Image (cartoon, rainbow, N blue to C red):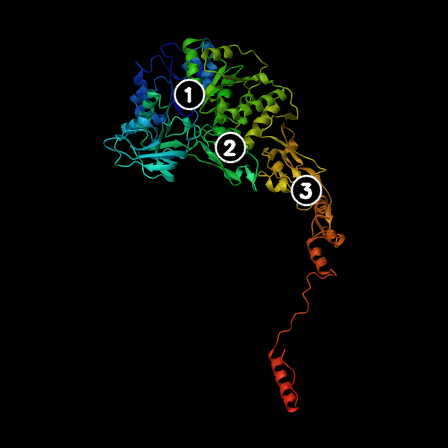
Amino acid sequence: MRLAGRRCLLCTCEGTSPLDAGALARALGSAEPPELFDRLCRAELDAFRDAAAKGEPLLVGCTQEVPLFLETAAEAEERTVFANLRERAGWSAEAAAAGPKIAALLAEAALAIPPTPALELRSSGRVLVYGAGETALAAAQRLAGRLTPTLLLSEPAELLPPSIVRFPILAGRITRLRGHLGAFTATVEDAAVAIPSSRDRLRFGMPSPTTELETDLVLDLSGGTALVTAPDKREGYRRVDPRDPLALERALFDLVELVGTFEKPRYVTFTAELCAHARSRRVGCTRCLDQCPTGAIAPAGDHVAIDPFVCAGCGSCAGVCPTGAATYAAPPPTTLLERLRTLLRTYHAAGGRGAVLLVYEARHGEEMVAAMARLGRGLPARVIPFAVGELGQLPLEVLAAPVALGAERLVVLLPPRKEPELSGLRANLDQLAALLDGLGYGADRLSVLASEDPDELEGVLWGLPLVAPLPARDLVAIGGKRSLLRLVLDRLHEHAPAPVPVVPLPAGAPLGRVVVDVAGCTLCHACVGACPTGALAADPDRPMLRFKEEACVQCGLCTNTCPEKVIRLEPRACFDPAIREFTVLKEEEPARCVRCGKPFGSKSSIERIVQRLAGTHWMFRSADQIERLRMCEDCRVIAEFERTDRPFALGEPRRPRTTEDYLREREEEERARSSGSDGPKPA
């Protein structure tokens, strides 16, 4: 059997994981059954070797023996994918009924996953050891044989100088550390270099106020506050309690390995043009800034900037971004939606019913699923596992998709240690619960469990009560962030038990409308200029404010920009087709010039200007001055020059002297001399 061009080799693991080749072929629409083995990793290993030698793309139903398979045929690594069918389905108290789930897992494994773009990091082995006393000195001495250390003593206490100095020794205090693996910069206050003539204890020269040290790696033994945010997520930075020798040994071992060239995934794709952070120095959306645990995101004018070298890949920024400016790339949301679609469509086509989607982080949930399979009842036949790299990356459209595709329940397993970092995911789950409840599905279709106990997870999954069945449905994931979200929500609404036109959502949701106090709005259109998505618009012919709800991302720039403070946000999911068109929020007759009658603005804005300036500004105290505020720009100029007091009058200009003036004066002087007169004096 072949799936997406891959030859399938499946194993019953010595009969412990039952597989029905014929049923799988029918469920997957294949004319030939998959190749079944009992001991593919041992007695039947030649079958894998022969298949790999033919250069075919392979799908192997085993993950436990991946190292052995790749050792047997290393050339097959790029062409082979492995699927865990045993712990996820075969080792279960309901293994006999797990055929539809196994078919779904195989179909998902055969999908082509786009590669994640990568960055290159280079480390030459420069390491800054920061700490005090013998512990820091001994650590630097041990690293000197493999790396290039610099010792920075945070407390220059009584310390016997080494007889042979193999590395620079300084004293000082780090006030700031920035950068990443291969490119750290430490700002040091009162840095002083050790004096070579130090005898009984280390002595230091004259300190400099501020010094910057560049290094590839940092070993922080100061025992104080971490020098960077989220220290566990910053590659190249190791913070160790100097009183813990075992932790210090691990850190030294890890640092020695961080020399050379490394690839780091570019987890997030960022499109600055879509960012709704700020406009004209007014701040709107700060969702990604509020969520980033590593400090990799910073304001950069009208948008934010994401440092891909500092980004640890938690995905929280992409999970809460309302516009799609920040999009997770490992993998992108369209790939996640295609995985969900493949899983549930195959499961339903194979006769599966009552699907429960279990969502978890692979490094956390896979261990719990394996423990349940080995020591308990395993996963129920209707529970379909869905592993992701980071839970924080899941936006609302991906979380809502399982129910839109016909899954009866969604169970999200959280790692308790990461709960403080998952507030964005919690917000998305709250929005999903509000949607499901408002549309009549019931909020109980969504379950969230924060646990590391396999027994607790097993009890929850096996104890899930039955809910009203949902029909199997399909959707094709196409388009960007907003179109995907609208596609999923429309599908939810189309088959909802109670398809109400509007569902209120919690604050912070990426959907909703703006509500304008019409009486206080002057149609100044400051909100129009600030709106980053074009949801608010003016009209070129009339004083008017228009709004398109489908384009609104609830960034808040309009509310923060409005000078009258008459705009507020109302988060909601509206399913009225009218949200795709502009509606008029306020309209009024234009203000007409009191002199020529030409329209030149809105009545409310002109009257608000008159109200604020009349009698309070020195230029607008008299009735005539105030009346000029109600004139168009041309008539104001004309009125100024018609004023009786002539404020711009400068008197008659002085006539320039010309050649004719000099000739005339010369003739007059000659006539005066001839007549005995002095003649006129020159001007």
The mark tally for this picture is: 3
Q: Residue 213: which disc?
A: none
Q: Which residue is drawn at 73% across and 42% down?
A: 588
* Lower sequence index among marks 3 and 2: 2
* Disc 2 element: helix
Residue 573 horizontal/vertical position (percent): 62, 28
Screen quadrant of the C terminus = bottom right
Bin the neighbour count of mark 3 within 10 Å (Cα to Cα): few under 14, some 14-19, many 20 and up.
Answer: many
Which residue is tagged 3? 523
Q: Which mark is residue 363?
A: 1
Q: In the rendered structure, which amino acid carries the disc numbered 2?
A: Leu
Q: Distance between the residues labelled 1 and 3?
A: 54 Å
The residue that mark 2 highlights is 289
Name above or below for residue 593 compared with residue 459: below
- Characterize the local packing of mark 2: few (<14), some (14-19) or many (20 or more) Cα atoms within 10 angstroms: some
The quarter of the picture where the N terminus appears is: top left
**Camera-nearest residue between 532 and 145:** 145
Q: How far apart are marks 3 and 2 (CA)?
A: 32 Å
